Image (tube, rainbow, N blue to C red):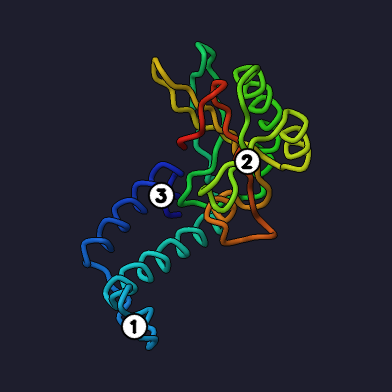
Amino acid sequence: MSKVHTTEELIQVLALERQACLNGDRLKLEISASGNPVLDQFFSSEGLQKFSAYQDFKASIHEYQRQNQVSGVIWKEITAKNQKIRYPEVDNQLIALETDMDILEAAKNSIVEFWQQTTSGMDLYLSILHGKQYQQVTVADSDRIIQRSQWATLLCYENPRFLEIIIQLGWGQPAEASYKSGFPISGSEYIHAVNPGNLPIG
C-alpha cells in the first residue's frame, strides 16, 4: 500500500507547483486567448495557460484529498491584546472534508468569544464591495452575522500605534468563500475591529 501524503506535504507540493506554473515550467497549451480583443489586451495566452495548469493541478490535489481523506485543516495561533488563541483553519489552497467542517464548526464559538473579548470597545466595520469599502456596524449587527455563520477565522494587524482584528464569518467551503467563487453555497463576511477613530486597513 502506498504512503498517503499529509496535509503539510500537500501544501508544500502545491506551493512548488504554483511556482513552477508561474515560472512557465507548466502550461496548459490548449488554452488560448479569449478572442475578445478588449480582454486579450489585458491577458496574455501564456498567463492563462499558467493559471489553467495550476488550477488543474490543484483540482487533482483536491480529488486526492477526498479519495484519501487528507484533511485540509491547519492550526493557527494569534495573539491580540496579550491574549492568545490556537484555532483550526483550512489552508487556502486545500478543500475542507466533511470531518474538517465538523472541526471548524466546533471551534467557531471559541473563536467568536476571543474576538468579542479582544474587540470590546472598538469600532466595527463590515467589509463591502469585495473589501473595497467599509460600513460601520453595531455589536448587534455583528451578532446577527455570527448567528448565521457556520465557521470563523481571524486576522490581526497590530503595532504600537494601530490595532485591527478581523473575523471572517463564513459558510460552506472556506476556499470558495474566500474567493467568492462558490456563492451562494459558500460565502463569508469580514468584520474589522479598530480602535475608535481609526479605519480598517486590512
The spot of residue 68 in percent (x, y) is 53, 54
Q: Earlier in the sequence, mark 1 or mark 3?
A: 3
User: In the visual, does 173 lie left or right of 46?
Assistant: right
Residue type pointed to by label 3: Leu
Q: Amino acid at mark 2?
A: Gln
Label 1 amino acid?
Ala
Q: Secondary structure at mark 2?
A: strand
The x, y position of residue 141, in whole percent, is 75, 35
Point 50% across, 58% down: residue: 62
CA gap, disc 2 and disc 1: 38 Å
**Contact (Cβ within 8 Å) of mark 3 with mark 2:** no
Tell which residue pokes out farthest to the front in this image: 197
Q: In front: mark 2 or mark 1?
A: 2
User: Which quarter of the image is occupied by the N terminus?
Assistant: bottom left
Residue appearing at x 54%, y 24% in the figure? 197
Q: Residue at x 61, y 61 (%)?
A: 182
- Label 1 crowding class (10 Å Cα cut-off): few <14, some 14-19, many 20+? some
Residue under the point 55% across and 59% down: 67
In the picture of the structure, the residue carrying the numbered disc 3 is 10
Residue 188, image x, y percentages:
63, 47
N-terminal-most mark, 2 or 1? 1
The disc placed on residue 135 is 2
Residue closer to the observer: 26 or 162: 162
Which residue bears the numbered disc 1? 33
Graded by Cα atoms within 10 Å as few (under 14), some (14 to 19) or many (20 or more), the crowding at tag 3 reads many
41 relative to 162 in the view: left or right: left
Q: CA distance from mark 1 to mark 3?
A: 31 Å
Would you place residue 186 above or below residue 135 in this image?
below
Q: Quadrant of residue 87?
A: top right
